[in-house]
């Protein structure tokens, strides 16, 4: 990191680990495609596979040679990612906070103070999916929470409100549909959690009767519940990784399945364990105030409240 609040601008670059990983994955898939018969290439077409993973590999090389850049200056933010540059004035954005997208990806999200007709639909969609109206790229040189704190402090120091400008109101976290609230990295209260669980379970049961769809449920259903469990755990201050205990126990049962327990008995025990875990985290009340995963669902953050009294 270059610069400081006393010596602007502050310049951050993205870390190179993901670029290297992208290049490595692309190289592996290109090698697999080359060794396959022409009629059995990835996606059924060798040239399509080579083109797709070749493009991803070149993108990774470019990200390594010219890493993403974030400039924090008295005039606002400038983010350069690949060939795209985005600029934000401090009078346009506020309320920076770290958010978790999935179990491993952490980003810095923010809200807009102005309502742009062109981006209104995108803002609402982003708010429903992640609880923020927009977000910076992930993987900067400092932790997401530290970057959010730095941006809030920089904005507070350098913000210049034009005389006569309208003062913003108190913006609450967007009220999300229960299923969307539980399928994102934000906090999901008990009502949203149980409604999302019921909806997903009902859809899985209904789709199980469709022969063409049934095989795909084996991979999709666990991913849905990973997100639902993580959002519920976040609400009472626990990391989404706590659910790993459930999957470890389930894996042990599958290993034992071929030995001590009959096949049906092992499946039944695994179902009971997951049912107990689902019921347990659904019964624990969420934190009444802000925790490390953000403010309570549908409640304004402290920064949003403070903004109206500026």
Image (spheres, helix red, strand yellow):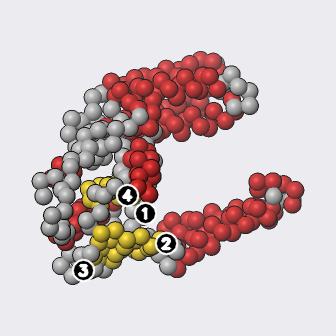
In front of the other: 241 or 53: 53
State the residue position of label 1.
Answer: 137
**Disc marking residue 8:** 3
For the residues bearing labels 3 and 2, Cβ distance under 8 angstroms: no
Which quadrant is the N terminus positioned in? bottom left
N-term-proximal mark, 1 vs 4: 4
User: Which quadrant of the structure image shows residue 281?
Assistant: top left
> In percent of the image, x 33 and y 42: which residue is there?
174
Taking the spot 56% from the left edge, 19% from the top edge, the residue there is 268
**Residue 253 location, x and y as percent?**
55, 28
From the viewer's side, name the closer residue of 251 and 132.
Answer: 132
Q: Earlier in the sequence, mark 2 or mark 4?
A: 2
Q: Which residue is mark 4?
A: 116
Counting residues from the start of the chain, the first of labels 2 and 1 encountered is 2
**How many angstroms separate mark 1 from mark 4 (CA)?**
21 Å
According to the picture, the residue beneath numbered tag 2 turns out to be 84
Secondary structure state at the residue bearing disc 2 = strand
Residue appearing at x 65%, y 21% in the figure: 263
List the single residue furthest toward the left.
Answer: 309
In which quarter of the view is residue 73 placed?
Answer: bottom left
């Amino acid at each position: 990191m270059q610069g400081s609040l006393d010596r602007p601008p502050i310049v951050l670059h993205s870390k190179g680990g993901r670029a290297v990983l992208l290049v490595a994955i692309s190289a592996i898939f290109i090698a697999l495609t080359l060794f396959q018969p022409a009629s059995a290439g990835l996606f059924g077409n060798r040239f399509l596979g080579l083109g797709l993973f070749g493009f991803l590999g070149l993108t990774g090389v470019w990200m390594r040679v010219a890493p993403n850049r974030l400039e924090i200056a008295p005039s606002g933010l400038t983010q350069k990612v690949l060939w795209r540059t985005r600029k934000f004035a401090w009078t346009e954005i506020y309320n920076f906070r770290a958010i978790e997208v999935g179990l491993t990806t952490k980003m810095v999200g923010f809200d807009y103070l102005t309502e742009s007709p062109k981006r209104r639909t995108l803002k609402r969609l982003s708010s429903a999916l992640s609880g923020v109206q927009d977000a910076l790229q992930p993987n900067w040189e400092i932790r997401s929470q530290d970057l959010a704190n730095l941006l809030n402090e920089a904005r507070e120091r350098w913000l210049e409100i034009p005389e006569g400008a309208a003062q913003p109101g108190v913006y609450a976290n967007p009220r999300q549909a229960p299923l969307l609230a539980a399928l994102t990295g934000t906090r999901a209260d008990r009502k949203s959690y149980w409604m999302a669980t019921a909806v997903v379970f009902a859809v899985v049961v209904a789709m199980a009767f469709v022969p063409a769809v049934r095989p795909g449920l084996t991979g999709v259903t666990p991913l849905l519940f990973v997100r639902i469990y993580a959002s519920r755990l976040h609400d009472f201050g626990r990391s989404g990784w706590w659910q790993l205990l459930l999957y470890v126990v389930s894996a042990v049962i599958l290993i034992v399945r071929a030995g001590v327990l009959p096949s049906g008995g092992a499946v039944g025990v695994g179902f009971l364990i997951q049912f107990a875990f689902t019921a347990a985290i659904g019964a624990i009340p969420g934190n009444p105030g802000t925790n490390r995963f953000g403010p309570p669902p549908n409640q304004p953050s402290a920064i949003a409240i403070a903004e109206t009294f500026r």
